[in-house]
Image: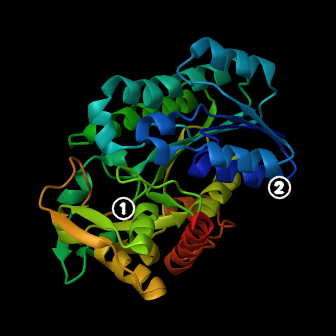
Amino acid sequence: MNVLVTGSSGLIGSEAVTFFDRMGFRVVGVDNNMRADFFGPKGDTTPTLHRLTDECGRFTHVELDIRDRAGVDRLFKREGIDLVIHAAAQPSHDLAAKRVFDDFEVNALGTLNLLEACRVRRPDAVFIHVSTNKVYGDAPNFLPIAEFPTRFDYCHPALAHGIDESLTIDRSTHSLFGVSKASGDLLAQEYGRYFGLRTGVFRGGCLTGPQHAGVELHGFLSYLVKCSLEERPYTVFGYKGKQVRDQIHCFDVVSAFWAFAQAPRAGEVYNLGGGRHNAASVIECVEAIAGATGRRPKLSYSPTNRVGDHICYYTNMNKFRTHFPGWQQRYSLQAIIAEMVKGGSRLAATAA
């Protein structure tokens, strides 16, 4: 099998490269390190590319901007692609408002370029689109939510397992990032429903892992671990630090992709996240990291929340688990934090 991974030096992309290389598949990775342009030196994914090149014997790197329609078409024409993992994106709420054309062109136009090239050149391939829960906009904020000492949480029995795919993506405030990702999400669905392309759309919660290059504008848990280990400032934006997110390890994300790839359902949509058992608020995460390290960041609180930000969000995975009962989630929140702390401590020791 030949696998194409876009955003191959990012968190999910690099995990996908490693995952499929270990399975013995040939992997073509597309990445142009635009994350360094978006986030500066701290977002540079060059070290990840070097690691993949050194460790993955079946991996080939292609430097390509997915906004280059002709280049994308040539890639699909040249390579016998059987599976596409489309993980390339502009991933930041805040940055989207500052670079509106880059955001939309990467997240929407780039997705269209890939889908159309796949339809024309490799119509039998499976196409997995990495979407986001931000396509729901702030609709989750209007569900029944109660405030508790350390978190907000849902207070209706129907939400006991979190947010499922029935939630509307319409009539809410998304941020421009949410809009561009919703555009790509709908395109991937439509290429499945209209053209019959074997597309699967995965609306991720907080996707994370030890190789996450977290920065203030993206990669919450990774960035919080870094700030905690170095005991440096961390700003909480809105909701008193009680906003809740569910964390899912990048390995569990890619293993879910593989489950879908073996029995695809054209145009299907799945919410993908850690679920209620992997959900925690910002201040609960601070305490969990402190319990593992004895260190805390220097917290400050801004009363203003980010536009379209969720007060509480964790993922109802019942639909995916019903469709793919063999899939197993390997990493708990505690295991994710322990792995990230270990990786962060090792990097700090190396730097010293």
Look at the image and name its color scheme: rainbow
Of residue 330 and residue 213, the one placed in the foreground of this image is 213
Q: Label for residue 189?
A: none
Mark 1 residue type: Ile
Q: Position of residue 232 (x, y in %)?
A: 34, 68
Label 1 belongs to which residue? Answer: 163
- Most extreme residue toward the top, as rendered? 70
Q: Label for residue 22?
A: 2
Q: Is residue 264 left or right of residue 191?
A: right
Q: Is residue 188 left or right of residue 182?
A: right
Q: Position of residue 145 (x, y in %)?
A: 19, 70
Q: Secondary structure at mark 2?
A: helix
Q: Position of residue 320 (x, y in %)?
A: 55, 59
Residue 145 vertical position relative to residue 295 in the rendered view, above or below: above
Q: Residue at x 54, y 31 (%)?
A: 193
Residue 95 vertical position relative to residue 72 in the rendered view, above or below: below
Mark 1–mark 2 distance (CA, rounded to whole Å): 33 Å
Q: Residue at x 32, y 35 (%)?
A: 96
The quarter of the rendered structure image containing the C terminus is bottom right
Mark 2 residue type: Arg
- Most extreme residue toward the front, as rendered? 352
Of residue 125 and residue 237, the one placed in the foreground of this image is 237
Q: Residue at x 63, y 30 (%)?
A: 197
Q: Position of residue 141 (x, y in %)?
A: 21, 58
Q: Secondary structure at mark 1?
A: loop
Q: Nearer the viewer, mark 1 or mark 2?
A: 2
Of residue 213 and residue 2, the one placed in the foreground of this image is 213
